[in-house]
Amino acid sequence: MTQSRREGGVLGGRKMRRRDFLRVGGAGLAGATLLGAAGCGGGGSEASGNVVFAMGVDTSGTLQGLVDKFNKQNKGSFQVTYREMPADSGQYFDQLRTELQAGASEIDVIGGDVIWPPQFAANGWILDVSDRFPESERQQFLPAPIDSLIYDGAIYGVPWFTDAGMLYYRTDLLEKAGFSEPPATWEEMKEMALKTAQDTGTKNGFVFQGSNYEGGTVNGLEYIWTHGGDVLSGDQVIIDSPESVAGLETERSMVAEGVAPEAVSTYKEQETDPAFLGGTSVFARNWPYMYALASDPETSRIKPDQIGVAPLPAGEGGQSFSGLGGWDMMINANSQKQDQAWEFVKFMTGEEGQTQRALAATLLPTRKALYQDPKILNEVPVIRLGKEAIQSTKARPVSPYYSDMSLKMAEQFNLSLKGDVEPAQAVKTLQQELTNILEQAG
Amino acid sequence: MTTATTEKKRRGGVLREEFRNPERRTAYYMVLPALLIILIVAFFPILQSINLSLRQATIIQAGPFVGLENYKEMLENPDFLEGLTNTLIFTVASVALEFFIGLGIALAINRAFRGRGLVRAAVLVPWAFPTVISAVMWRLMFQDQVGIINYVANSTGLVSEPILSDRTLLLIGVILVDVWKTTPFMALLLLAGLQTIPGDVYEAARVDGANVWQRFFRITLPLLKPTILVALLFRTLDAYRVFDLFWALSNRELESLSTFVYEGVRISQLQFAQGNAASVFIFVTAFLIAIFFIKVLGMQTSTEE
């Protein structure tokens, strides 16, 4: 009897508490959801009136300084906020694409990679600035960066800073082997590399980026261009040509003739740096940033005065071309503050903005005039030494479907470099695949 | 009045029986929020994926209905087939190796010896590293300039080219790294299972004159079967969906089913529909593998059998 009463009492009590618990729990859940929704909604809006500028991580530390300077000059009218985006270019692209596609981005000005403009413009996500940026103004900039911003006859941004593939070489090693000038053709380079490596006991003649990734596409394209071939002509895929085959054959011969190590087909920039800066290579193809690394004893066993920089060699009877890299300024087509954004863009790409970035961060300017500026030429050696390379850059194929094209090209160039596929076959396969991509796109 | 009506009462009556009982009813109400969340968070994206995979989908829009065309294109895509082959070889090889080595380790540390706790903790160290970090670490060891493994392999003549540049060698390398990483996990799962086998069974067997092999095959293995099946299912599904190991170690060279999905959905502009179809494919086949384990191999899913 006592048992049942206790049971009844306990059960009864528990049941009451259980119902209370349900009520409290339900209310709590509903409250949490409301708070969450309110929080998400509230956090999105920026302090109104600020122009938001998105750019990847700035390792030089100069970007915020420039933004602050602009804000000081414009105190009272509007301010700019620098929103840091992922350091990895691919991740940054993904994030931008997600935001722009949802149509709900707060970003007004985009600092973007030079291969993005056509992909964004085709979807209508960036602003056509043809009327704000007339032909006369465009003449003041280097031609290749301008080309990278033109889509369907209109221009979609302003070049900011540029990058170009360059031939690095060891002046001291070449001297020892009896050479005083950098090579002008690929054949010459191969001869010089082999002889110098032998005479000086250096492990590698030449290192470059041959791995299956975006940089591999750029390297492969450089070989094709310097032999007179090209990928796109307007909307036509023209990669299937004897010139392209010659280019890829030259790339393959680097490994086949022992000028470059076999593993170069797995190299990216991170592998090229230690190979050249560690002193184990006579020549290297890399971007301008590697020069700055040479002055730091922590990253380099050789010193800047042992390094020379030259434009890339050309194929027989061809012209020297360097792969164009770099960053452009674009404006979000849905921005509510287009005029103010344009003011900011003009400032950052103006002579002052570019000079500052060149001096403080050794980033290459895109304005032609700055390549005559004695101060810049003196203080940023890679600009003086690499002037020719920088001025002969060529943009990667301008297409809204460049990402897909690049995936295919990187794969075929890598297979051709490894010797798994004949260069002639690789070129034919690419002609087919790239044409398919453009047809699919419609 | 007989079986027909009682069955009908049982069928229709189960639901009413459940809900009439106030305790049971409260239980259902308490589970309801979690169920709703699972439905919204898990089922909705799955259904949406299936929906998109039947359409000509791009990143921006769902597109017109095209039926199974995406799946057909996907099955004809050489990259997908390569990913499928690599994934299957990887799954079978790594799970098999992990199982045998893990079982050996589990049997070894099943006996009580001094320092056993320490050994068990130490054995877990490879498993504790985030996969991406160990992938990058191993990649450095396979690399041609600074890699010790590449150096040894090439100088002893085992291999004649840089490990990272050959797809077969890469696959072997990836399998070995996965075995290095996950064998401890297998070993510990199997060890937990071994410890549920009471010692008296072995005593009785020894008294009856059973030798080591007979004890192992007649006692250990059958009693360990539930644990083995659980461990195998976990590892098989994990290995089937491998992404970070392939991506980080081979730097995009080696294709697996998941890297194919990633490339299609995130990197490419035009492969979105195929990537999506591939992700549904992975979901369905993983589900089928789980069902195979449960129904055909007789894996236990609850303690009431």
Image (cartoon, rainbow, N blue to C red):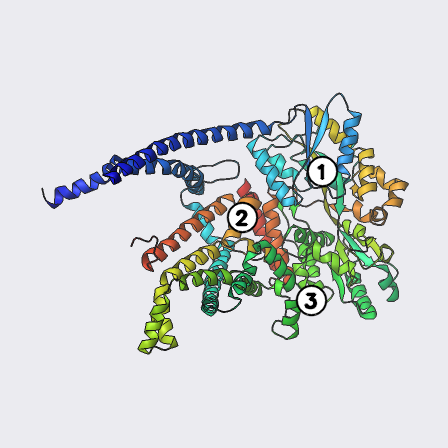
Quick one: label 3 or label 1, which is nearer the N terminus?
3
Q: Say few, some or many: other residues with alpha carbon within 10 Å of mark 3 (under 14 / 14 to 19 / 20 or more).
A: some
Residue for point 32% across, 56% down: B295
Q: Amino acid at mark 1?
A: Asp
- For marks 1 and 2, give the one nearer the viewer: 2
Task: Tell me whether marks 3 and 1 sit on the same chain.
Answer: yes
Residue for point 56% across, 60% down: B126
Work out whether residue B215 or residue A422 is closer to the camera in this orientation and state it: B215
Q: Say few, some or many: other residues with alpha carbon within 10 Å of mark 1 (under 14 / 14 to 19 / 20 or more).
A: many
* Residue B25 place in picture, x, y as percent: 30, 36
Residue that carries the numbered disc 3 in the rendered image: A256
* Residue B36 place in picture, x, y as percent: 40, 36
Q: Secondary structure at mark 2?
A: helix
Q: Amino acid at mark 3?
A: Ala
In the rendered view, would you say A356 is above or below B259?
A: above
Q: Say few, some or many: other residues with alpha carbon within 10 Å of mark 2 (under 14 / 14 to 19 / 20 or more).
A: some
Query: Residue A160 sits in which quadrant?
Result: top right
Q: Chain of mark 1?
A: A
Instruction: Give the label on residue A328, or none.
Output: 1
Q: Amino acid at mark 2?
A: Tyr
Q: Determine contact: label 3, label 1, CB under 8 Å.
A: no
Task: Tell me whether marks 2 and 3 sit on the same chain.
Answer: no
Instruction: Give the label on residue B262, or none.
Output: 2
Residue for point 32% across, 72% down: B204
Say if residue A427 shows up in the picture: no
